[in-house]
Amino acid sequence: MTAQEARLCGLLLREHFGEVVEKIGTHLLRSGAQNLRTIVNESGTPIDLVKKSLCVLMKHGACRFSIGRKGPGSPVEYQASCERILGILRYPRYIYTAKTLYSDTGELIIEELLQRGHMTMSSIVKMVADRLTHNMEEGRSIEYNEVVSTFSKLVETHFLQRCPPVSEVVPPVSTAPTVPGAPAAPVSTGPPTPESFSDCYLVPSVSLAGRGKRRRSGEDAVLDQGTTKKAKTDLQTHGDEGIYWQVNFERFHLHFRDQTIISAVASKLDQTSSEIVRTMLRMSEVTTTPSASCTQALSANEVFRSLPANYSISRPVLDQYLTLLVDDPMEFVGKTGDSGGGMYVVNLHKALTNLARATLESVVQEKFGSRSARIFRLLLRKRHLEQKQVEDFAMIPAKEAKDMLYTLMSENLVLLQELPKTPDHAPSRTFYLYTVNQLATARMLLQHCYKTVANLIDRRLFQTKESKRLLEKSQRIEAIMASLQASGAEPEQLTEVEEMISTPEKQQLESLRHHINKLDSAENQVDETIFLLKSYVASTARITR
Amino acid sequence: MADAKVKKECDPADAAVIESRIKELCIQFPQGITDQVIQNDMPQLEPTQRAMVINKLLSVGQLDLLRNSSGLLYRMKDAQSASKMKGSDNQEKLVYQIIEDAGNKGIWTRDMRFKSNLPLTEVNKILKNLESKKLIKAVKSVAASKKKVYMLYNVQPDRSVTGGAWYSDQDFESEFVEVLNQQCFKFLQSKAEVARDSKQSPMIQRNSSFATSHEVWKYICELGISKVDLSMEDIETILNTLIYDGKVEMTIIAAKEGTVGSVDGQMKLFRGVNPIIQPTGLVKTPCGLCPVFDECHEGGEISPSRCIYMTEWLNF
């Protein structure tokens, strides 16, 4: 965990959970696993605040507890997970994916779960139904069953999973907060993965009947309190107590990876090839482990049968497309055998490597120009080259080539490898070769991305702080307007209230909103780069292990 | 007395006869004659006499003195070069010979000094002399711009000295290379587009979007944008730069010997391609392109809150 990651985690925690949680979270990230007393002493916060923050972090999966290192009798230790906290950056992408796959219902389910961390199925269903009904026209409401069916679909495709039941690690007397729903189970040595439980994707049979309730605006305040109180002391049991659900981030990441590969194939070759690759990936969704370097082998016959109905291409044409995919220098698809009309695999690791390489090249191109990009690609292809050879291959005059190489070296994108001819390493008798190390450069760019996102968040907070006074004024005006409208005031009163904001202030507000949106969308774009580079680094680490 | 008599016998008439005899021998053996041959032919000739005659012929410039593994060789010098050297002295002749030996690569002044063992001033004077007589010329080397190599006037400088087709007067022609680059790319791109629009089976589409290096070479020649004649290897170096630009990919196929454009039974095929990803998210933010990225931190002189690049970008 690097300094940039820690800074970014701190900013994200502060935005989503507040300053107390940020303090405890960053403290845990920096100091590793610690028990409760140490946290209280070192961070200087009162013990009840520490307990609450740990609860919040655990509910969202950002912190986990385990037996103390000194043995079974020592106090429980807590450890924060940097990756999980950085995943907060990707929430908008998860919600958007759910919307494209399962429309509004799915979007709301995922949104609620992401906000609350762990929830039972019945509470999710009720909440989502209420929200959907609120957005529909008067007189219509949504059945609980529809939400339940979308929920089941999400579970079937493994986008949602049950939270793993936690073993009874500590005696009830200790001060450790208990994770809700902890049936007695054998003590496990490491943190159990959700998938090690066989019921992970089993939808419980709940008795949920009813429709979503619409909130009336007049009874808003009363009903709000009512519903929140109800959530806490829900006397109506539905038969799934103690079964909590969480979002399966791994599955979403696999989905994102597949999307990137498909769009790369589409832009390199054509639409039909990308459809074939999409079919292949869809077929191997459940048979391939997430950490495999290539999918399971699929025969051409199976692919032909599973193609979507509107893509009616004949069998020989399909064979031709597959051959073209195999022959492509990018090596997205490989052929592993000839049985069943040809066995084909999607080379996931190679695809990720190529995509990461394209990312590096595009960064160099945008930052330094297309000629430097030419040199960079040349070095990636030919591995080690001398100064003279670089000039000759790239067809760039000597002076300019030297200048570009030195600039790239000063940014640590290009490295110098010395090959001495004599044991005394005399400079006049040594070969100096330029080279690019793809993995190290990818890691470095990943850190740059983290810093960039932290900068963007900083800037956004700064701009909001600058215009705080203006924002407060506009909020007050809106509140006054809303109350006036609800109580049925005359139009003159409304316009009078509206004019309390002057036009330049309105413009300022408008530009502020525009800036904040731009910064937000930029964060999402950088997150895409982060995802690609991180997948590549993780995949290479798995391969070389 | 006998000695004096012997000496008297070598009078000018004799010398002339011996000279002409040696010249005939030279013509008979164009690759050169040794002392041995002269001895066999004229056994009565004494070594001193022979040496005198040969020296005379050498000084007049009608004989060439060479050395090979078995001894000295004398060769007839052809009449043309004999006339050229009239009026030059031995040193100049030596220098000229060295330059001639250097062929089309030319020779540097320092090497000249080593080979001829002449002092620097002498060498310079002689070189200037020969240059004014238009017998040799100086060519600037492209590798080291201060170095001058000398070669015979009518000899074409070698590629390694001038740099080949891409250099004109020792200057790398960047614009020329750029223009060729773009033309080749346009040709390949239009070919790929035609293939894509033809809507035939994908295999045929891909194969028809390929162009051999020979085709590209012919196209460039017909365009006529180059003043210099370009060979197929030159075009291939240009196409390689397109590969390094990420715009073109190459495959090699086996071809029958004798088909047009095949080299050693192989043909290189080139094809225009699209990039596989759009410019990545990091470069869409000002931080991705910032020149002072490493010096930026919160609370410092350069910080995200006060970043002028961000302000510009937000107001865009």
Image (cartoon, rainbow, N blue to C red):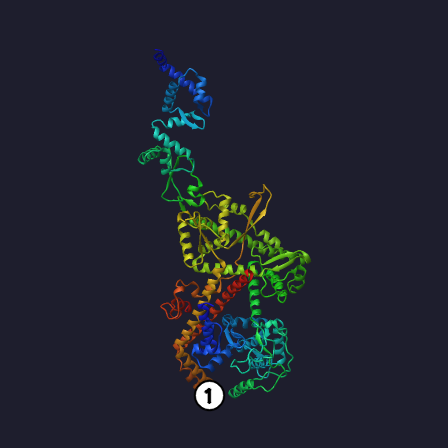
Residue A339 appears in view: yes
Picture coordinates of residue B239, whole percent (x, y): 50, 50
Quadrant of the image occupied by residue B266: top right
Is residue B227 in view from this perspective?
no
The structure residue drawn at horizontal position 37% and vertical position 35%, both measured from the top left corner, is B114
Q: Measuring from the top left, give residue A96's x and y in whole percent.
A: 54, 71
Which of B116 and A520 lies nearest the eye of the viewer?
B116
How many numbered circles are shown? 1
Q: Secondary structure at mark 1?
A: loop
Q: Is residue A466 left or right of residue A194?
A: left
Q: Is residue B207 left or right of residue B239?
A: right
Subunit ID for the residue under disc 1: A
Asked whether A39 or B115 is in front, the reply is A39
In the rendered view, would you say A473 is above or below A295?
below
Image vertical order of residue B307 relative to residue B33, above or below: below
Q: Quadrant of the C terminus of chain B?
A: bottom left
A65 vs A455, nearest the viewer: A65
Picture coordinates of residue B264, whole percent (x, y):
56, 42
Q: Position of residue B298 (x, y in %)?
A: 39, 70
User: Which residue is under mark 1?
Assistant: A489
Along the viewing direction, whichever of B220 and B145 lies nearer the viewer: B145
Three-letter amino acid code at disc 1?
Ala
